Image (spheres, rainbow, N blue to C red):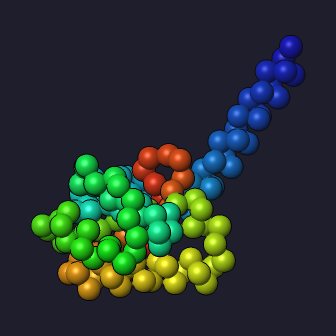
Amino acid sequence: MRTDVAALCLMLIVGCAATLRAEDKLIPSGRAEEQYLKADVVLYFDGPDAIQIERPVGQREAFKLDVLTARVAKATKERKLAVIIMSKVTRLWPDDKFKAAVEDLEARLKAQGFAKVAIHLASGTFPTPIYRE
């Protein structure tokens, strides 16, 4: 009985240590949540033919990349911070294609006057991890 308890304790300690090491490499979730909540616009990018505006609320209809500028202009007044959440599907793209999409989206939003653009990765949890700021 004692060996079972000792083995369980050892597994918990090892599991916690592994978790701490993995979390140390991530940007703290507090900043990601703060960005999401303070953003003037939050975009969900699932490809050039399937973009949605998550925030402000009520803009969830999917649209294509060619109308991004008009949709964002209509949805925002302030342009301090934009957050783009890259879908899990886009994360499976080859690295060069993914990076090109990120660069293009960031350039389009900066051209619209956004002071800062943060890129998050869809993860199935909230807040989404920060990929780039």
| Observer-nearest of 106 and 18 | 106
Determine which quarter of the picture holds residue 40. bottom left
Residue 125: image location, x then y, percent: 50, 46
Q: Is residue 47 left or right of residue 21?
A: left
The structure residue drawn at horizontal position 63% and vertical position 48%, both measured from the top left corner, is: 19
The structure residue drawn at horizontal position 52% and vertical position 60%, both measured from the top left corner, is: 87
Q: Is residue 96 above or below residue 38?
A: below
Q: Is residue 41 above or below residue 68?
A: above
Q: Residue furthest left?
A: 77
Determine which quarter of the picture holds residue 42. bottom left
Q: Is residue 133 left or right of residue 14?
A: left
Determine which quarter of the picture holds residue 132. bottom left
Q: Is residue 124 above or below residue 78?
A: above
Residue 109: image location, x then y, percent: 30, 78
Q: Residue furthest top?
A: 1
Q: Is residue 36 visible?
A: no
Q: Is residue 111 above or below residue 38?
A: below
Residue 38: image location, x then y, percent: 24, 57
Q: Quadrant of the N terminus?
A: top right
Q: Is residue 11 visible?
A: yes
| Observer-nearest of 122 and 21 | 122
Residue 14: image location, x then y, percent: 73, 42
| Observer-nearest of 69 and 126 | 69
| Observer-nearest of 76 and 63 | 63
Q: Is residue 37 left or right of residue 18?
A: left
Q: Quadrant of the C terminus?
A: bottom left
Q: Is residue 58 left or right of residue 77?
A: right
Badge count: 0
The structure residue drawn at horizontal position 24% and vertical position 74%, both measured from the top left corner, is: 70
